[in-house]
Amino acid sequence: ERFDRLTRLAKRVFGVPIALVSLVDAKRQWFKSCDGLDAAETPRDVSFCGHAILGDDIFLVPDAAQDKRFHDNPLVTGEPHVRFYAGCPLAAANGSKLGTLCIIDRAPREFSEEDMALLRDLAQMAEQELAAVHLATMDELTMLCNRRGFEALALRALGLCRRMDKPASLLFIDLDFFKPINDRFG
């Protein structure tokens, strides 16, 4: 819901039909939040966000149909008929690019400096939310997943196994008296 609030806000503020918080990996982009689009993910090789994370500032495509990089892209020539794209990269605390906060329109449009400043502000809010999720799911001392983080990763892994029709296994290790060892040796 915290990311859905941001995409709803971006969609309303900019008057666009689509706003996304995307996370990009080597082969795909998937949508942490998506308002105005039915897809849950797309291949990275056709994604605009895959281009956006290569830079440090807003990646702007005023008219994708006139842009030699995107004019024949299936997201331009078919649904959702992207014509305008503005995406601001989202980075982790260590500087790694994770994805984007982006807005999409089905018509070409201009994007002012004021618009870019506002998109940067919204993207910074998304980064803060990603950092909060990270802090809430990691043990500060060991930097391993805590219970909440494990449950989130387990649900994601089980979903992937289901989609790929693969079996899943779980290995559980319980360390007795770990706290005194950790207190003494760090």
Image (cartoon, rainbow, N blue to C red):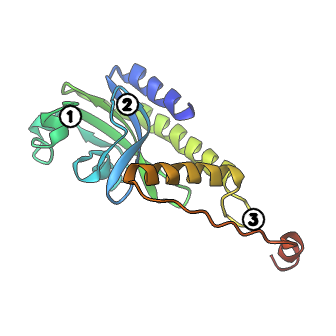
Q: Nearer the viewer, mark 3 or mark 1?
A: 3
Task: Identify the residue shown where x is 47% and y is 24%.
Answer: 9
| Disc 2 residue crowd, few under 14, some 14–19, many 20+, Cα 10 Å | many
112 or 138, which lies in front? Answer: 138
Res 56 seen here: no
- Image coordinates of residue 172 in percent, x first then y, are 69, 66
At 83% from the left and 80% from the top, the residue drawn is 185
Residue assigned mark 1: 62
Q: Quadrant of the C terminus?
A: bottom right
Residue at which label 3 appears: 141
The secondary element bearing badge 1 is classed as loop
Q: Earlier in the sequence, mark 2 or mark 3?
A: 2
Which of the numbered marks, if any, corresponds to residue 75? none
Please tell me which of labels 3 and 1 falls first in the chain. Answer: 1
Q: Could you tell me which secondary element the residue under label 3 belongs to?
A: loop
Give residue 72's position: percent from left, percent from top: 9, 43
**Disc 3 packing (10 Å; few <14; some 14–19; many ≥20):** few
Please tell me which residue is depicted at 20% across the width and 38% down the height of the picture. 75
